[in-house]
Structures are given as C-alpha cells and as structure tokens.
C-alpha cells in the first residue's frame, strides 16, 4: 500500500506521474484492486489507469480522511480504550 498526501490535486497528479516513471525505470508492476465507487469529483491517473478516490482509508490500522486528518483514528482509539477500561 502507498498513501500520497499533497496540498493540491495538481501536485498529487505530479507525484503520481513521478511515481509512474519510477516504476518504469525499475521495471516494477502495480496491481490495483478492482474499483468500486469512482467519484467524479476527483480524477487521478497512474499512466492511463484511473485510480479510485477514497473518502476514508484505513492504513496500518489508522483511519484517515481524504484531507489527511487523523481525527477519526483518534476517536476510534479513544473509544476502544474506553471499552477496554470498562471491561476490566
């Protein structure tokens, strides 16, 4: 998995273009899960492949939003710790 965060959609597309060139240089392959819900609000490509836009994503067990905010992750961890304390 890879998460790219950029302040603008243009910068994100530039980073994806650089990433594509890196993969070509080192003969690396990209495997993508089949897209489920494509959002027309944003379109990003890795070469000619349309990438899926996710509003939320769980990465290494932490839930983050499309803005890069970890508020959801903090709330989830707080709720889990409360449950753990109440169970003991």
Image: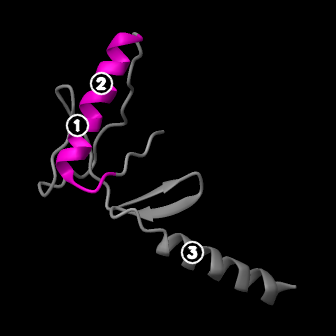
Q: Which residues are magenta?
A: 6-26
- Judge from the rendering whether residue 75 lies leftward or rightward of residue 41; answer left or right: right
Point out the residue furthest to the bottom here.
Answer: 86
Q: Determine the image quadrant of residue 82.
A: bottom right
Element on which disc 3 rests:
helix
Task: Find residue 58 and report its horizontal and vertical position in percent.
Answer: 49, 57
- Judge from the rendering whether residue 58 lies leftward or rightward of residue 37; answer left or right: right
Residue 20 — which label?
Answer: 2
* Disc 3 target residue: 74
**Mark closer to the chain start, 1 or 2:** 1
Is there CB contact under 8 Å for labels 1 and 3? no
Between the C-alphas of marks 1 and 3, the distance is 30 Å
Residue 7: within the magenta?
yes
Point out the residue furthest to the left here.
Answer: 40
Is there CB contact under 8 Å for labels 3 and 2? no
The image shows residue 72, relative to residue 32, as above or below, that is: below
* Disc 1 target residue: 14
Element on which disc 2 rests:
helix
Residue situated in front as seen by the camera: 2 or 9: 9
Between the C-alphas of marks 3 and 2, the distance is 33 Å
Task: Find residue 5 and report its horizontal and vertical position in percent.
Answer: 36, 51
**Mark closer to the chain start, 3 or 2:** 2
Label 1 or label 3, whichever lies nearer to me, is 1
């Amino acid at each position: 998995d890879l998460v790219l965060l950029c302040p603008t959609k243009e910068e994100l597309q530039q980073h994806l273009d650089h990433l594509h060139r890196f993969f070509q240089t080192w003969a690396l392959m990209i495997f993508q899960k089949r897209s489920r819900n494509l959002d027309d609000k944003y379109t990003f490509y890795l070469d000619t492949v349309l990438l899926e836009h996710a509003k939320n994503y769980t990465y290494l067990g932490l839930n983050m939003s499309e803005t890069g905010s970890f508020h959801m992750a903090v709330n989830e961890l707080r709720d889990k710790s409360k449950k753990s304390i109440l169970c003991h």
